[in-house]
Each structure stands twice: as C-alpha cells, then as structure tokens.
Amino acid sequence: MAKRFISTELFNERWFQDLSIEHKLFWVYLLLSCNHAGIWNVNFRLAEFQLGIKLDIEKIKDIFQDKITILPKEKWCINKFLSFQYSSNNKSKAFLSAKEILKKENIFQRVSKGLGKGYQTLKDIDKDIDKDIDKDIDKDIDKEPNKESDVKNYKTLNNSEFIKSWDNWITYRKEIKHSLTPATIASQLKKFSKWGVIKAIQAIENSINNGYQGVFEPKDIDVEDRDNLPEIK
C-alpha cells in the first residue's frame, strides 16, 4: 500500500475553505489517486463511482487550473506534488522514478522548482517522529515523582517499609490513569507524616484494596491488627 505526505493544515487554508464539499472531496481524492510523480490518469467515471458524487469536469478544471497541469493522453499533473513529497537531495528509488516519469512528460523542470530540504523517504520522517516521542518521554520522566527524594523530606517516613508502600501507591495511581501530581504528593506526605508510618501504610493498603483514588486516615488500630503490621525498621 502506497503512502504519501499530506498537509495537516489543508483544512485551514483559505483556498480550500472556499471549496464546496464535493470539490474538497475531489482534491483529497486527487492527492491520493495520483501516482508517485503526482500524475493522475483522468477517469471521472471511476472518481464519481468511488466518491459517490456527480462531478462537473469543466468546473473542476476551472477551479483547480492553477494547481494542476493538463497533459496529453488524458493525464493531469499536480503542480506542487513533487516539491511537497520529496527533497532536492533525494536519492530514493521513488523520487528517481518520479523524476524520469515527469521528464518523459516534459514537465519536470516546471514542477521541480519548489524542491527544497524535505524528507527523503517515509523512513526519515518516522525517525524524526521517534526522536520527538523520545523527547516527550524524557520530559514525562522528569515530571514523574521521585519516590525516595520526596520521602526523605519527612524523617518519620524515611524507612524501607513505607517506601515500599509509597512505591505501590504511585504505581497504582498510574494504573488507574490518575498519576500523582507534585501538589498531591506534598499533601499526602504531610498527612502520612502526621499519621505516622503504621497508619500511613495501612491507609495506602486500604485504598489500593478498595480501589480508592484518595487516602483516608485509619481508625485506631486494634491489638490483633498490630500483630499483622510489618516491622518498621
């Protein structure tokens, strides 16, 4: 299946906004139905069948006269297709093939004027997308709460058992799509510090077990419950 670039700003461009629904649809159809050189083998009967609309050929020629070049043998060429899809230093097979096709149609010099520094292949744009995704991931990592450094701000909570529970709480909140914000972290740690380690751990476990988003101070702990609590080191 062939792939090609299309501008995400197309529907924001004034000339496109002024088109009728039928002509908007036809222009997108043209972009997707032409070959890799931007040449469309004119077939309005097929276009009407695939789009499910009636098309006025002469009106379309008039509307898109500055965007297409009518070639011999029932062919149209989209004028800026080559410059949008390829870069001037492109060495891909697709570009070299498109270049030969356009030369045979005696139109290469005309449509290649806008060639600039663009993407050489779809693989190139995928690499750039991956780089952007990696940057976003790095930003998100920077924003994630640092479990131990936050806890270290509270001496009463700085022990292995609470840190383990705190880790479980952060993971749980992410799993339910409600990650802790810095403000929530500060607020909850202040509460836990006042409640003490034993109550804090019990509150976290209670919220996770019951599917709560928040944490609530446990009631006074019974003697039997104390025997089941972890040893605080």
Image: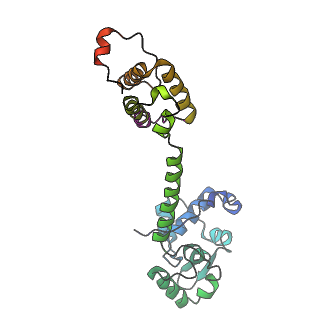
Work out whether 31 lies above or below 87: above
Quarter of the picture containing the C terminus is top left
Say whether residue 79 is magenta. no
Quarter of the picture containing the N terminus is bottom left
Say whether residue 178 is magenta. yes
Q: Is residue 203 left or right of residue 64?
A: left
Residue located at (54% from left, 35% from top):
181
Query: How is the rendered protein coloured?
Result: rainbow
Residue located at (39% from left, 24% from top):
201
The front one of 5 and 61 is: 5
The front one of 158 and 108 is: 158
Q: Position of residue 128 (x, y in %)?
A: 51, 65
Q: Position of residue 98 (x, y in %)?
A: 50, 82
Snapshot quadrant of residue 172: top left
Q: Which residues are magenta?
A: 171-181
The front one of 121 and 185 is: 185
Q: Is residue 115 left or right of residue 134?
A: right
The front one of 126 and 193 is: 193
Q: Position of residue 23 (x, y in %)?
A: 61, 62
Work out whether 194 lies above or below 109: above
Residue located at (48% from left, 85% from top):
96
Snapshot quadrant of residue 186: top right
Q: Position of residue 74 (x, y in %)?
A: 53, 81
Residue located at (71% from left, 60% from top):
14
